[in-house]
Image: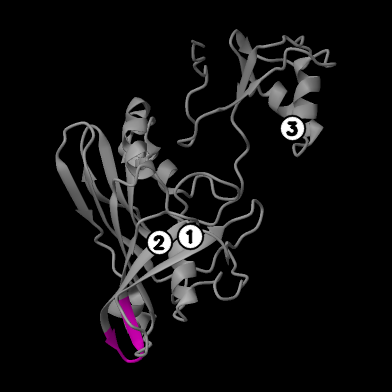
């Protein structure tokens, strides 16, 4: 069994240091030469500055500009942070104990660092706020979707909770606001095959064996709008948004379906009216039945004047 190698660098801004393993063979005389080749998006002048600032660290200490290349060793460093637009909404705490944190993620906030969203993510905010540097998510919600996300306080427990989602042993309930279509027969179960290509923003429903299933129920309707309960039994990318769009009732505020619309990152108006409302499961550590309900509400239904 390979022994894990612990980072010599502490977290910075709630983020773990990046780690690079130097290949066993290669033409690089120095670690600097390898870094320039390995990090093509970083200007070599910036790499030199980071080396001078002792930002690259090996197991034996900081790496210098002339440090010899050592095959099979590791180098850690903290990436430069992107400029981010602050998301002006707080992450709510629905439940917390020594093992888990159940959070209410607001619209427009990513669950984990990715791409242009790093510190403005639920994970980083919670690590810093709760002083839980090892906090990890058991699953994710899309950035536009609000609602419940389950986090695990210790990484060694993550697999126990992730397995619940993988094995579909978590009952999930969503709410959405969309147009009311009286001619629709509800409740109904929507089944389709969904594919998502890497690098493409939107997913597609295509012919073939279904791999996605959602039960759609009508909760209430007024003024041409309706509030729907969505009960997915699978978790395909954008599944709920695609299934409602396929029924002719795209979710209010959806900038992907039926048409892809450009939206500035600092535009926090008209959020996607989709809420992860309920999570229910048997706790893998205690056997206790757990049920958590979001405290958030969809503005288009509960505060239409603000929508």
What residue would you read off at disc 2? 213
**Can I make out residue 127 in this image?**
yes
Q: Position of residue 268 (x, y in %)?
A: 48, 68
- For marks 1 and 3, the one nearer the N-term is 3
| The C terminus - image quarter | bottom left
Snapshot quadrant of residue 287: top left
Residue drawn at (35%, 25%), measured in percent from left and top? 156
Q: Position of residue 204 (x, y in %)?
A: 58, 64
Q: Position of residue 18 (x, y in %)?
A: 58, 29
Secondary element type, mark 2 = strand
Find out whether residue 223 is within the magenta segment. Answer: yes
Give residue 226's mark.
Answer: none
CA neighbours of label 3 inside 10 A, class few (<14), some (14 to 19), many (20+) = few
Residue drawn at (63%, 70%), measured in percent from left and top? 262
Classify 141 as above or below 79: below
Q: Main secondary structure of the magenta part?
A: strand
Give residue 210's mark.
Answer: 1
Q: Disc 2 vs disc 1: which is toward the camera?
A: 1
Nearest the eye: 169 or 306: 169
Residue drawn at (47%, 29%), measured in percent from left and top? 11
Secondary element type, mark 3 = loop
What residue would you read off at disc 3? 39
Nearest the eye: 197 or 64: 197
17 left or right of 239 in image: right
66 left or right of 256 in image: right
Magenta-highlighted residues = 221-227
């Amino acid at each position: 069994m390979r022994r894990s190698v612990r980072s010599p660098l502490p977290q910075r801004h709630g983020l773990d240091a990046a780690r690079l393993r130097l290949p066993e063979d290669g033409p690089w005389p120095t670690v600097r030469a390898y870094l320039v080749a390995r990090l093509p998006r970083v200007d070599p002048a910036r790499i030199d500055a980071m080396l001078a600032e002792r930002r690259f660290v090996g197991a034996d200490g900081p790496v210098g500009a002339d440090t010899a290349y050592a095959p099979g060793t590791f180098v850690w460093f903290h990436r430069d942070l992107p400029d981010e637009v602050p998301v002006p909404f707080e992450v709510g705490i629905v439940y917390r104990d020594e093992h888990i944190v159940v959070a209410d993620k607001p619209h427009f906030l990513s669950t984990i660092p990715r791409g242009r969203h790093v510190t403005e993510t639920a994970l980083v905010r919670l690590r810093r706020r709760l002083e839980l540097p090892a906090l990890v998510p058991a699953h994710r919600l899309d950035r536009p979707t609000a609602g419940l996300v389950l986090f695990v306080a210790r990484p060694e427990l993550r697999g126990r909770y992730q397995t619940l989602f993988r094995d579909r042993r978590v009952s999930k309930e969503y709410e959405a606001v969309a147009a009311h279509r009286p001619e629709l027969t509800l409740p109904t179960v929507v089944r389709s095959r969904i594919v998502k290509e890497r690098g493409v923003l939107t997913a597609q429903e295509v012919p073939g064996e279904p791999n996605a299933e959602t039960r759609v129920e009508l909760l209430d309707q007024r003024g041409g709008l309706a509030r729907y309960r969505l009960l997915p039994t699978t978790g395909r990318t954008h599944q709920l948004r695609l299934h409602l769009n396929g029924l002719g009732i795209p979710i209010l505020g959806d900038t992907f379906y039926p048409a892809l619309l450009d939206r500035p990152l600092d535009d926090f108006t008209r959020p996607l009216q989709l809420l992860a409302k309920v999570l229910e499961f048997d706790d893998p550590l205690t056997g206790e039945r757990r049920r958590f309900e979001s405290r958030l509400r969809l503005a288009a239904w509960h505060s239409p004047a603000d929508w």
